Amino acid sequence: MGIAREPLIFHPGPKLVYRQENETRTVLGINGMRIGAQAVAVMAGPCAVEDLFQMRAIAAAIKPLGISILRGGAYKPRTSPYSFQGLGRPGLEILAQVRTEYDLLVVTEVMSPEDVPLVAAHADILQVGSRNMQNFPLLRAVGATDKPVLLKRGMMSTLEEFMNSAEYILLEGNSRVMLCERGIRTFEPSTRNTFDINAIPFLQRVSHLPVIADPSHGTGRRDLVGPVAKAAIAAGADGLLIEVHPWPDRAQSDGQQSISPDELEQLMNDLRAVATAVGREL
Ligand code: PEP
Ligand code: MN
């Protein structure tokens, strides 16, 4: 007798985040872009906004590659209080200026509920970082906006906890949520985090929300960003979040995992081939 095969639905139940049997996956519309559809979305830019010159350099580099979402943190959740904390409001103003100049969409992190209106006024997508995945007042605050949310997985959170955090946002009426796998802490010290490739197909099976992969924080090493990005697309990711800096060795944060614009150009070619092989576009 064979093993009984259960339907691969995790928890069909009342939660908004779950995909009910036969329910199709959600496609998020953001200013004409469609995330979760055939095309894999790429979001690229430095870890932190440092100055206008840097952000213009990155915008000018990504635009010809067909990348239309620019990332960069103005509010940085740093482990050490002595590390660069981000430019704050002036950083948001730089993002908004570059967004207009280069006709790009902007994704940037918001760290506290009080800052949500200000960040929402300067960005197209609100990022909730790994360290804030269970900041419930923040989740409710972004859930009360009309901006799409990029929710990053807590570095020590299970997938069930991750989906519950998304549920907080959905419950406030905001259904444009993307789930971002960005690596978790394991016993392995060779890489900054362990990128959980399982999370991609698992979340897509259990939830209807688009799944984004962050191979930069997932590995912490620029030489591993490309291979893990390719694996993520092969596993079905709906988008990628990649840290790129015009001068990675001079970055104020996360330089060791940032790739250069030239490396990004090469990577995009490689990623396009993988996307095509799995029936996607890039
Ligand atoms: C970031 O995107 O730069 C960031 C701080 O990510 P995470 O919250 O995943 O650490
Ligand atoms: Mn970073």
Image: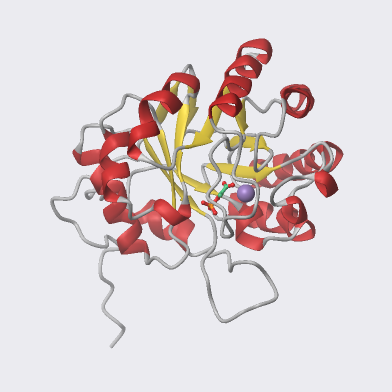
Q: Is residue 66 above or below residue 164?
A: above
Task: Name the residue nearer the viewer: 251 or 104.
Answer: 251
Task: Name the residue nearer the viewer: 145 or 43.
Answer: 145
Q: Residue furthest left?
A: 14
Q: Where residue 61 sits: x, y (%)?
A: 79, 27
Q: Where residue 251 sits: x, y (%)?
A: 77, 45
Q: Is residue 165 above or below residue 64?
A: below
**Residue 180 visible in the picture:** yes
Give the image quarter of residue 243: top right
Q: Residue at x 78, y 24 (%)?
A: 53
Q: How is the image coloured?
A: secondary structure
Q: Is residue 123 above or below residue 272?
A: above
Q: Where residue 225 sits: x, y (%)?
A: 72, 55
Q: Is residue 33 left or right of residue 246?
A: left
Q: Residue at x 36, y 43 (%)?
A: 209
Quadrant for the N terminus in the image: bottom left
Task: Name the residue nearer the viewer: 260 or 67.
Answer: 260
Give the image quarter of residue 148: top left
Q: Is residue 219 above or below residue 101?
A: below
Q: How many marks?
A: 0
**Residue 206 visible in the picture:** no
Q: Is residue 167 left or right of residue 271?
A: left
Give the image quarter of residue 241: top right
Quadrant for the C terminus in the image: top right
Q: Residue at x 52, y 71 (%)?
A: 185
Q: Residue at x 74, y 48 (%)?
A: 258
Q: Where residue 71 sits: x, y (%)?
A: 61, 34
